[in-house]
Image (spheres, grey):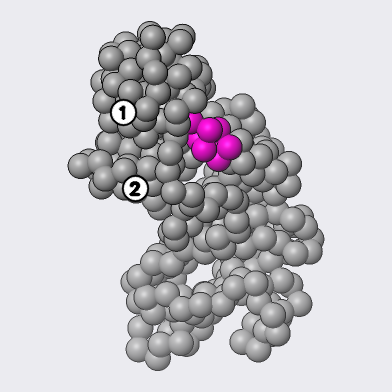
Amino acid sequence: MSPTGKIILATLIFCLCGFDVGAVKGPVSVNVDVPSGEFKAVRLKNLPRGSFVAVEVKTDGEIEVVLTNTEDYQRFRDARRPLFRGRVDEKLSFSVSIPESDNYFLVFYNRSEKRPRAVTATIMASRDSPDDINAADKLLSKFEQQFHGLFIFDSFPMGVAQCRISRTFDEGSGVILCAEYVQILYRSLGNKQKAMDALSFSIFHEISRVLLAQWNHPGAAHETTADELAAVLMIMLGQKKRLSDAVENFTDNPSILKNLQQALKDDHHPLTVQRTAKMTDWLNNPGIVLKWQKFLVPHMQTALLEKLHANPTEWTDRPGVDKELTARGKKVL
């Protein structure tokens, strides 16, 4: 086994399992049986300061989960400041940033006096890169400015935040990108350009969902509608190649999609195999952007309408643009 794929397993008195975060490129699953009244632990070996750990725990009954450093692990029942402590009955997902370089321990404590618990933990560790987060934040800021210059809509929050869970976007209002998603993408794809391509589509998809709801589109609640509008907007804004590259990467590497779907339990991101097939169809359909103009034109800024009137593109609905300009009191020559 190569050093980059090596997982070091050691069996101690309580089944202590460890791996080196630098060697893990995707999620690692560990199965643990915890007897009644006992605990078992998984050792996360040599985690560097600033790295990121995402965990999903599945169990057949209630169990306590604690993630802590070496010092607190030695007294985990009375740990002073564990990075995470919670109870899980069936499934639980969480993520944390590592404050100091150390060995860390994911502990499963079965308080039940009646029966053992079967636990499956899926763990993904990556080196946090502030540059990646800053790049994502700048990308969102650029999108926000660009969209306000092109379309008329009620402002909504946009930014990057630590969601403390393996999630793509915060479930609140607006488009709040989870830093954890950025980190998982960069780690899973292993290439900044590919990660940015995938991230760009995710952002366009979320923006599309918000705009469809604001603009009362009949298909606002449907994922396919948001996917289609995201593709249309990317093509309109000169991002067709970025979309095409993201689709091609996922189509050619289904294992990447599988790993991302294991790490991120999300109905919208990343793309599925079925959705990439639809995206390919839209990319090869020259009329897809024109089809959406009837819906988009009334929401365009006047400056954009005037630009499209003066210099129509291959997808410009010139009669629709002229009609909208006239309705706004602008002279159309």
Q: CA–CA distance between discs 2 and 1? A: 21 Å
Report x, y in % for residue 73: 68, 77
Q: Is residue 93 above or below residue 204?
A: below
Residues shaded magenta = 143-150
From this viewpoint, is residue 154 visible?
yes
**The residue positioned farthest toward the bottom in the image shown:** 113
From this viewpoint, is residue 55 visible?
no
Crowd rating for badge 2 (residues with CA inside 10 Å; few <14, some 14–19, many 20+) = few
Question: Toward which corner of the image does residue 197 lie, by quadrant?
Answer: top right
Proximity of marks 2 and 1: CB atoms separated by less than 8 Å: no
Would you name the residue on which mark 2 appears? 214
Would you name the residue on which mark 1 appears? 327
- Is residue 169 shown left or right of residue 182? left
Report x, y in % for residue 285: 29, 13
Crowd rating for badge 1 (residues with CA inside 10 Å; few <14, some 14–19, many 20+) = few
> Residue 148 lies in magenta, yes or no?
yes
SS for dot 1: helix
Q: Is residue 263 above or below residue 198?
A: below
- Is residue 74 shown left or right of residue 147? right
Report x, y in % for residue 300: 41, 30
Observer-side mark, 2 or 1, equals: 1
- Quarter the N terminus occupies: top right
Q: Earlier in the sequence, mark 2 or mark 1?
A: 2
- Is residue 44 shown left or right of residue 32? right
Residue depicted at 42% across the width and 43% down the height: 153
